[in-house]
Image (cartoon, rainbow, N blue to C red):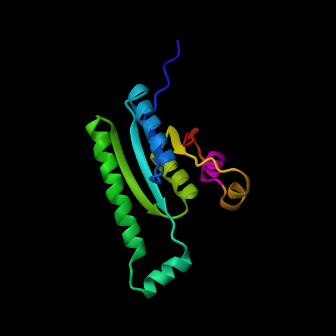
Amino acid sequence: MTEPWRLRTIVVPIDFSECSRRALDLARFLAKETGPGHLVLIHAYFVPVELEALAEEAHEPILDIVSQRATEDLERILVELQDEGISAEFAAHRGGPERTIVDVAAKKGADLIVMGTHGRTGLAHVLLGSVAERVVRTAHCPVITVKPT
């Protein structure tokens, strides 16, 4: 008889959108049902060079502001998870989301990545691409994607 599949570490990219919240809900469920699992929440932020330059000219530390707000929001989610008895941690990193997600998952030895996808199609998909698609292609572990509806 084979042992049931256990998820010890689940990486959950968070961009604070509805689809990432839905992905977090699924990860919560999986951590409880197939674990106990440990959730690693990851937020990757990317600020275009042009915006960064404008912010520097205005003496606005935009990267500090973005990082601080993301950290505060992630801390609130972490407290919710811990109140539910779910082991979790978070990290906010500057950089491209797909590379950051894949790197953190590899570093943490993730068994699974659960992430939201905006489900863009047509021209929006061509112009913006899909972070989820790139993660699925390059991740070392399985990836579950969750659409907003």
Q: Is residue 100 above or below residue 28?
A: below
Check the image and report above or below for 40 versus 67: above
Seen from this angle, which residue lies furthest front?
149
In the image, the segment drawn in magenta is: 130-138
Q: Position of residue 87 (x, y in %)?
A: 33, 39
Residue 77 versus residue 143: which sits nearer the camera?
A: 77
Instruction: From the top left corner, tell me how far across and down residue 14 is, in percent.
Output: 46, 51
Q: Position of residue 143 (x, y in %)?
A: 57, 40
| Residue that protrudes farthest toward the bottom in the picture | 57
- Residue 88 appears in which quarter of the rendering? top left
Residue at 42 percent across and 86 percent down: it is 58
Tell me the residue at 47%/54% (across/down): 15
In the image, taking residue 149 as reference, residue 126 lies left or right, namely right
Residue projecting furthest to the left: 83
- What residue is shown at x 48% (from left), y 47% (from top)? 18
Q: Is residue 85 left or right of residue 42?
A: left
Seen in the image, is 118 located left or right of residue 69? right
| Residue 93 located within the stretch drawn in magenta | no
Q: Quadrant of the C terminus?
A: top right
Q: Is residue 80 left or right of residue 135?
A: left
Residue 37 at what x, y percent from top left?
Answer: 39, 34
Q: Count the marks.
A: 0
Q: Residue at x 39, y 55 (%)?
A: 91
Magenta span: helix, strand or loop, mainly?
A: helix
Q: Is residue 137 magenta?
A: yes
